[in-house]
Amino acid sequence: ALVTGATAGIGEAVSRRFSNSGMKLILVGRRTKKLESLADTLGTAAHILPLDVTDRNAVYESFKSLPKDFSKIDILVNNAGLALGLEPSAQANLDDWDQMVDTNIKGLIYCARAVLPDMVSRDRGHIINIGSVAGSYPYPGGNVYGGTKAFVHQFSLNMRADLLGTRVRVSCIEPGAVETEFLTVRFKGDSEKARNFLKGANAMSASDVAEVIHFVATAPSN
Ligand code: NDP
Ligand code: 8X3
């Protein structure tokens, strides 16, 4: 299984959950040291792939030149993503908007497109995209973040239409609030703000979501 955004939160938890059930892993993220320390603590073989998913060539080149033992990807967990800022649309930072589109939409489609041909030719595989409740339910300041997750939902449905008749599966997992680095990233390092935002929310843990992803990944293809 190849997991993007494996250095923290849901991606890290799903890597551990998959490894506990015996899967070999390819771990993707920008922070190399975090990938290395995760790989060191997993009980199954893991190959690290430090890269930025917004870099189309990096995604293509590194997915193409995987070591032989890791070259057949059966599961892609398309998880790398982020929210930046919570300002209303009229005040939002355009660089933040670009980065959300580049990561949550473009990074996700690059990874999907890079693994799909081999899955189709082997008639086997599962792409698990990570959407969000924010893709269906609006909230003030959700603007572009929610928009990117609505894209993830619809792209998942449309990929299923393309893959009809094959045994390649596409799922979209759309969690509510999960306690990870997500809000610290959204509030640009202000962990106090992040903590207050979740007060009283009874948020899920990353391992709660990893359990759902593991269930989906190991369900029979029919
Ligand atoms: P975290 O911030 O804890 O983890 C995000 C991960 O994405 C990190 O591993 C980060 O790695 C990686 N990432 C971000 N940008 C890039 C990039 N350009 N290239 C490669 N990797 C990148 O957040 P979560 O675990 O909560 O988020 C994971 C997914 O779940 C996201 O898609 C998010 O939108 C979604 N989600 C989160 C919810 C929540 O409440 N937490 C709820 C619903 C959905 P690095 O920095 O090392 O590159
Ligand atoms: C993250 C959940 O509600 O903070 O996707 O946008 S929410």
Image (cartoon, helix red, strand yellow):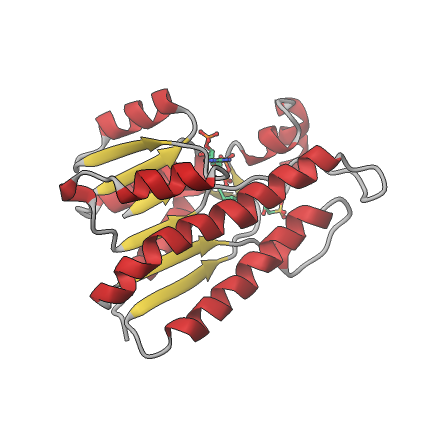
What residue is drawn where x is 42% and y is 72%? 162
Which part of the image, by quadrant, shows the C terminus? bottom left
Who's the residue at 85% across and 42% down the image? 90
Q: Residue furthest left?
A: 69
Asked whether residue 130 is in view, the answer is: yes
Q: Is residue 203 visible?
A: no
Q: Name the image quarter holding residue 49.
A: top left
Which residue is painted at 43% across and 71% down in the image?
160
Give the answer, above or below, for where 6 lies relative to 127: above
Name the one closer to the observer, 196 or 156. 156
Up the image or down, 119 lies above or below 201; here it is: below
State the count of labels: 0
Foreground residue, 200 or 67?
Answer: 67
**Residue most extreme to the right:** 90
Which residue is drawn at the image coordinates 52% and 56% (left, top)?
174
Furthest-bottom residue in view? 165
* Coordinates of residue 190 in the picture (x, y in percent): 65, 22
What residue occupies the far top of the structure in this picture? 33
| Viewer-side residue, 85 vs 164 | 164
Q: Quarter-wise, where is residue 193 in the image?
A: top right
Residue 1: x, y in percent?
27, 48
In this view, 211 is above or below 16: below
Question: Is 21 on the left-hand or right-hand side of 52?
Answer: left
Horizontal side of residue 72 vs 108, given as left or right: left
Left/right placement of residue 19 relative to residue 32 reads left
